[in-house]
Image (spheres, helix red, strand yellow):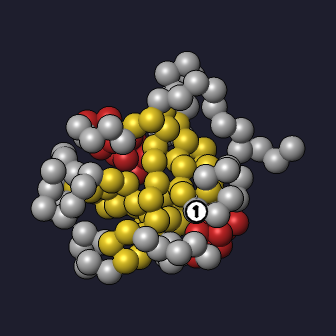
Amino acid sequence: MTEEGQPRLQVRTQFDTNRIHIQGVGEPTVNRKYGIALELRAPPALTEWLSEQEPTLPSPASGSVLYAPMSVLSYVEHEGSVQILIEGEELNHPKGAMLDVKDDSTAVSTLISFVKESKSGLVLEGGELFSTEEE
C-alpha cells in the first residue's frame, strides 16, 4: 500500500468536455509517486454527467476531494473486452456510468497494465459484457 491510502481507481468529476482524468493509487508506481495518472477521451454526454456527480474521494496529489470511484472490468469470456464503471447516479448502468474502452491507445493499455499488475484486485472479471447501447 502507498502512503496515499488504500489502493483504488478514481476519476475526477470536473475536468474537460472530451476527456476524463483518472488516478490509480497503489503499486506499481507508473508516472506518479502514488501510482498512475492519465487521461482518456470520453463522449461529452459522459463528461457532462460526471460533472454533476458529487466527488467523494481525495486526490493523492493535493488532498482535495475531487474524485469519484471507478473500476476496470475485464471479461474473461470476451478476450480484449474492457469496460470502465464510474460510480454515481444512474446514467447507463444501475451503479452509474459504463464506458467501453479499447486497449489500442497508449493511455488505455497503460491503465489496463497498471490494474492487472496491482495487487489490489482492481480488475473485476465478470460474465457477460454490460451493454452500453441504448435500447
**Label 1, on which residue?**
88
Residue 128 visible within the image: yes
Question: Which residue is rendered at x = 33% and y = 72% of the image?
Answer: 58
Residue 39 in view: no
Q: Is residue 18 above or below residue 70?
A: below
Label 1: how many residues lie within 10 Å, few (<14), some (14-19) or many (20+)?
many
Q: Which residue is pictured at 71% across the width and 38% down the height?
A: 131
Q: Is residue 123 above or below residue 85?
A: above
Q: Amino acid at mark 1?
A: Gly
The quadrant in which the C terminus is found is top right
* Total residue callouts: 1
Give the left or right position of residue 55, taking residue 60 as reference. right
Task: Residue 38: give x, y in percent of width and height.
Answer: 37, 60
Q: Position of residue 98 (x, y in %)?
A: 61, 49
- Which x, y percent locates residue 57? 38, 69
For numbered disc 1, what is the local secondary structure?
Answer: loop
Look at the picture and state if 79 lies above or below 109: above
Residue positioned 71% across, 53% down in the render: 92
Q: Residue at x 53, y 75 (%)?
A: 54
